[in-house]
Image (spheres, helix red, strand yellow):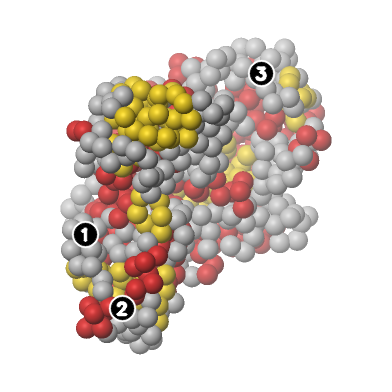
Amino acid sequence: MNRKYPHLCAPITLGRVVFRNRMFSAPMGGTDITADCCVGPRTPGFYELRAKGGAAAVTASELVVHPQTDASHMFHLDLHTPGSLSSWTFVADAIARHGAVPSVELSHSGQYAGTYLIDKDKKKGLTQYGPSDWVRPDGIPVKALTAGQIDDIVKAYGETAALAKRAGFQMVMVHGGHGWLVNQFLSPAFNHRTDEYGGSLENRLRFARRVLQSVRDAVGPGFPIEFRMSGAEFFEGGYDIEEGIRIAQGVEDLVDLIHVSAGSYQFGFFRTHLPMFAPHGDNVWLAAKIKKHVSKPVATIGALNDPEQMEEILASGKADVVEMARALLADPELPNKVVAGRDDEIVHCLRCFTCMAERPTTGTRRCTVNPLIGREIEGTEVLPAARKKRVVVVGGGVGGMKAALTAAQRGHTVILLEKTGELGGILKSEQALPFKYEMYRLGLTLARQMELAGVEVRLNTAATPELLEQLAPEALILATGSTPIVPNLPGIHGDNVVVVNNYYKEKDKVGDSVVVLGGGLAGCECAVHLGMEGKTVHLVEMRDQLAVDCNIRHRPILMQMVDKYTTVHLKHAGLRVTGEGLVCRDETGAEVLIPGKTVICAVGQRSNRADVDALRGCAPWVREIGDCVRVSNITNAVYQGYHAALDI
């Protein structure tokens, strides 16, 4: 069979282990962790899903090697805690049984110990250890490790690697990037020691080399060791790519794969975890530069989810392996689809940070486009229904499409009714914002999947009681969505006003100066887009904060972009639209004109309850999902649509 992406599909040998392709699942923290830092019951299934999906290697994260100096609430592996070794054995087995190579990331947080503690006040009472004494920007003091402590940590890396091998892992990754302890020793910004571990690069490399030698001694020859490093730190005082090259050269004799990432925890979160505003693969150049100067294979990472881009990276020699994390949450089957040439069915990561926001918010995992994530223990297969039924779904937005697709996968006869001429619902409006195009593409992907599953789609067809009486559904899923709120302001229906949902159809109406009325998520993102286009943008919000509906990971980068591209007016209530802009009342009660040739109305959405009320009596089994129940987000619409179909 001729592969569409031959380089991605080609095997690679690291040490004495053969990996089935060049698509690796990068480290991601597990779904649950017990009070004594063992692997919880949900976590093996979390990693197994990516192994089943075809990834060549699946790396579990993060395994803390020396809890005595790293008090983060992350996974441990020891022979003293009941269930510790066995729980890791179950993880390795869950990965290996599907033909993937199980790997585990060996880590030490160093001066960021306590980062993952649920009790944030508790970490203030911890002793934070690092290469040197200093006080972090958040006021937490850091104490320099003694020579004896360094010896203990080096020994612990080897002991933990040996236990990982005993548990069935066939590769280990040593985390030497992102501002964790190994990186802290490498970084001139953090390492101010005057002994054999500080000063010259040779000295700053000493700790990393001792760690890697300890691991090699423990696992033996031929056992693959992957070293994860930041190609550059991207903050003042940190090392650049030229020193990153020398670091890679300084460890390559001890490792089998050099994994090149970027950034540092406290100063570069969004360099490491590229947001939707950054280009896909924005860190690949680091790996490409390092690869020119080392003899060992190099892996690259950074918002990679497009097979064509990843194939080009390998074909052009920029890297030997591509690694993905969020992309394989969104679609664990991505590698299988690439191998089979079914890339048109890939559900792409939206880079919305829901997955990363859920950990500090609820202590769980969730993905906007994949309702299985974090809940794999509840079942990952869409099983055939015991009795096939006639199902009608009303509404062709993301929730309705997910419901129709899932119901069809169960074997039901499914008709989807959409009153407009196009599927996608509110996702249609995202096509005009380049950094949100993947949200629009989600609608196209779901439409393609419905087609393959046999869903009958009827566009330009309004659902009425009369039509539903003819169709006689045994199950009815109402996903009628929401409509934009247009406040009753003088001038709001003028030619110089565009409702944000319609921006993709009326872009040409927007002038070079714009007032965006409404500082929620939609208004902020539209304002940023307009500012990136070079327009003068004023963002008006009646509350004292912007984007209060935004998750805690996406919001900081969004606020940076808002500050860069817009002028913000908080506590301003719109009064009327004029030809000169938007007249508002400020917090003092005074009227002020916010100038702009165009006004974008983005004040929110309202549930379409009238449609629901008219149709809820048209079938013996009825379920309401998504915005028609309560205006929310894509995450809830997908989750509710999936489970509504499972309940039929």
* Left or right, residue 359 beside residue 70: left
Give me the C-alpha separation between circle 3 and circle 2: 64 Å
> Is disc 2 surrounded by few (<14), some (14 to 19) or many (20+) residues within 10 Å?
many
Q: As displayed, is residue 626 above or below residue 545?
A: below
Dot 1 amino acid type: Thr
Residue 558, percent from left and from top: 46, 33
Q: Identify the residue position indicated by label 3 in the image.
A: 191
Dot 3 amino acid type: Asn
Q: Which residue is nearer to you in this view: 605 or 624?
A: 605
Which tag, 3 or 2, sits closer to the chain's start? Answer: 3
> Is disc 3 surrounded by few (<14), some (14 to 19) or many (20+) residues within 10 Å?
many
Q: Identify the residue position indicated by label 1 in the image.
A: 420
Asked if disc 1 and disc 2 are in contact, CB closer than 8 Å, the reply is: no
User: Element under label 1?
Assistant: loop
* Left or right, residue 480 beside residue 462: right
Residue 152, percent from left and from top: 76, 35
User: Which image quarter is the N terminus in?
Assistant: bottom left
Dot 2 amino acid type: Val
Q: Quadrant of residue 601?
A: top left
> Is disc 1 surrounded by few (<14), some (14 to 19) or many (20+) residues within 10 Å?
some
User: Element under label 2?
Assistant: strand
* Left or right, residue 108 beside residue 503: right
User: Which image quarter is the C terminus in?
Assistant: bottom left
Mark carried by residue 250 = none
Q: Nearer the viewer, mark 3 or mark 1?
A: 1
